[in-house]
Image: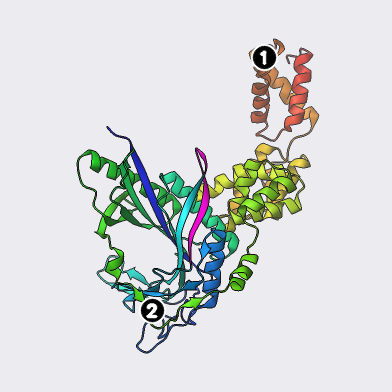
């Protein structure tokens, strides 16, 4: 490419608030119920029905906004956002336009250059639409209105994000905060957390932003990242080819790994916003806001600092462990049961997180409970198993929920600590590998690792590594070759 380009990204995150009833009526928000079983005249928009604001939705919205360093508006109102779509029964959505519940916040993310502030333009309350269900292989679509009227907090960032990696980091940090606050379960599979992205590219040094494209239909942070990477490349290639980038909404096609055009992008005036006539404006007093602020829990940064001090683990470890509320809780549960926090941290960050990423799981859904997890460390401390065997049995524990001691017993993996048995293996390994033995005696310390590895191989990982090292050294230093 002949020019350098700058990517500019803004994110709109829709968070379903953890209320038991909908935003403007008393219908249940429980997920997975029979289609159209949680509806009433209000959320279906029947003539004469009147909305009433769910105060819990307002409280949770303010709680999230305060944690995101937003300014809370003292005077708020709701507006009608008008558009036609089959799953929007009223043909308008109750949202907030010019007087949202909060505005002008920020969130810090980590990047190659250190910490970076991403400004949050606004966080406002609105109701959700329903859900279309398309017939497999058929020509019909069905509408489930159960989700209609569910309270959402829409968090809109400023265009301060300059790469797909930064977008991923922002979303991860944001999700972590929302989970700590317990304002939402943030379950992307159930639609509790959804993200749209606005992206444009511009030649480096240019003052005017490029034409922005909105991306939709991204159901995981991973797909947000991949879609943004693809779209930035597509726009740059278009500009390089002297093509015009059109302002539009595009869908991410997961199977093809591309974005496809959906419709031309709407502007605010296309929605014909006007004040919701059935809801009066609301005045929020300082005492109400202060009380909500006092209810904020320990968030990730505070928890990170406490972990470093209380558990004497490195700052890096604490940062990894506290990025996810459920991971932090898992670590603390383990630390109550086992007195070596650094050992727990090492295994969580290596073995446990590797499994979680491979299976695309969330920590909260792990089958392996902390009590079972720390049992591995006790077995190693007792000399029953080696670290190698511990790593060998962990995947089965994660999949089957079997206990470590049971797996070790079933598979005959008890560590060999019998010195006479290890002595015999050491003799055989020295005899069969004369060159490494001679190299060690000549001062090449790394030759010992090779010989240790041969014994571990011979014992199928069951030989006690400390005893193996000790006996090998003794034999080699005494000049025993057989």
The boundaries of the magenta stretch are: 102-115
Q: Where is residue 128 in the image (x, y as percent from the top left)?
A: 41, 71
State the residue in front, 440 or 72: 72
Determine the residue located farthest toward the top in the rendered image. 442
Magenta-drawn stretch contains 107:
yes
Q: Residue at x 32, y 56 (%)?
A: 214
Residue 231 against residue 185 in the figure, above or below: above
Label 1 environment density (alpha carbons within 10 Å; few <14, some 14–19, many ≥20): few
Using the numbered discs, state the Cα–Cα distance from disc 2 to disc 1 in whole angstroms. 81 Å
- Structure colour scheme: rainbow
Residue annotated with mark 1: 444
Residue 182 visible here: yes
Q: Which residue is drawn at 53% across and 65% down?
A: 184
**Could you say whether the residue bearing mark 2 is in a helix, strand or loop?**
loop
Number of numbered labels in the structure image? 2
Determine the residue located farthest toward the bottom in the rendered image. 48
Q: Position of residue 344 (x, y in %)?
A: 69, 45
- Tell me: 305 left or right of 55: right
Residue 402 visible here: no
Q: Position of residue 398 (x, y in %)?
A: 60, 51
Q: Earlier in the sequence, mark 2 or mark 1?
A: 2
- Tell me: 94 left or right of 3: right
**Quadrant where the C terminus is found in the figure:** top right
**Quadrant where the N terminus is found in the figure:** top left
Q: Main secondary structure of the magenta part?
A: strand
- Tell me: 107 left or right of 457: left
> What numbered label is drawn on residue 276?
2
Label 2 environment density (alpha carbons within 10 Å; few <14, some 14–19, many ≥20): some
- Tell me: 130 left or right of 115: left
For marks 2 and 1, give the one nearer the viewer: 2
Magenta-drawn stretch contains 305:
no
State the residue in front, 379 or 118: 118
């Amino acid at each position: 490419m002949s020019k350098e380009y700058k990517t500019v990204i803004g994110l709109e995150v829709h968070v379903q608030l953890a209320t038991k009833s909908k935003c403007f009526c008393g219908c249940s928000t429980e997920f997975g119920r029979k289609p159209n079983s949680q509806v009433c005249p209000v959320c279906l928009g029947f003539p004469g029905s009147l909305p009433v604001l769910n105060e819990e939705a307002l409280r949770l919205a303010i709680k999230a906004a305060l944690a995101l360093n937003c300014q809370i508006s003292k005077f708020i109102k709701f507006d009608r956002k008008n558009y036609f779509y089959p799953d929007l029964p009223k043909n308008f959505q109750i949202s907030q336009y010019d007087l949202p519940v909060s505005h002008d916040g920020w969130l810090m993310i980590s990047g190659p250059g250190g910490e970076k502030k991403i400004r949050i333009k606004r966080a406002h309350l609105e109701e959700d639409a329903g859900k279309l269900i398309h017939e497999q292989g058929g020509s019909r679509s069905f509408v489930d209105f159960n989700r209609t009227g569910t309270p959402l907090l829409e968090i809109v960032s400023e265009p301060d994000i300059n790469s797909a990696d930064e977008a991923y980091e922002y979303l991860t940090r944001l999700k972590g905060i929302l989970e700590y606050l317990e304002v939402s379960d943030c379950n992307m599979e159930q639609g509790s957390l959804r993200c749209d992205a606005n992206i444009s590219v511009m030649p480096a040094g240019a003052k005017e932003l490029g034409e922005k494209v909105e991306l939709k239909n991204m159901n995981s942070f991973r797909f947000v990242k991949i879609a943004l990477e693809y779209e930035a490349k597509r726009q740059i290639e278009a500009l390089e080819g002297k093509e015009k980038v059109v302002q539009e909404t595009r869908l991410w096609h997961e199977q093809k790994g591309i974005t496809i055009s959906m419709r031309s992008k709407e502007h605010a005036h296309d929605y014909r916003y006007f004040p919701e006539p059935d809801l009066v404006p609301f005045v929020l007093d300082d005492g109400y806001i202060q009380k909500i602020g006092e209810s904020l829990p320990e968030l990730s940064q505070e928890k990170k600092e406490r972990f470093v001090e209380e558990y004497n683990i490195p700052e890096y470890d604490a940062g990894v462990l506290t990025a996810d509320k459920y991971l932090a809780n898992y670590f603390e549960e383990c630390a109550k049961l086992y007195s070596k926090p650094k050992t727990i941290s090492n295994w969580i960050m290596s073995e446990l997180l590797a499994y979680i990423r491979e299976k695309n799981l969330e920590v909260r859904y792990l089958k392996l409970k902390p009590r079972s997890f720390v049992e591995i460390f006790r077995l190693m401390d007792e000399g029953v198993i080696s670290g190698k065997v511990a790593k060998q049995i962990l995947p089965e524990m994660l999949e089957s929920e079997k206990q470590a001691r049971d797996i070790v017993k079933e598979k005959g993996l008890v560590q060999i600590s019998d010195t006479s048995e290890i002595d015999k293996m050491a003799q055989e390994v020295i005899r069969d590998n004369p060159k490494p033995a001679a190299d060690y005696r000549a001062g090449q310390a790394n030759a010992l690792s090779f010989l240790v590895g041969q014994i571990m191989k011979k014992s199928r990982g069951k030989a006690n590594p400390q005893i193996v090292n000790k006996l090998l050294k003794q034999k080699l230093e005494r000049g025993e070759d057989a």
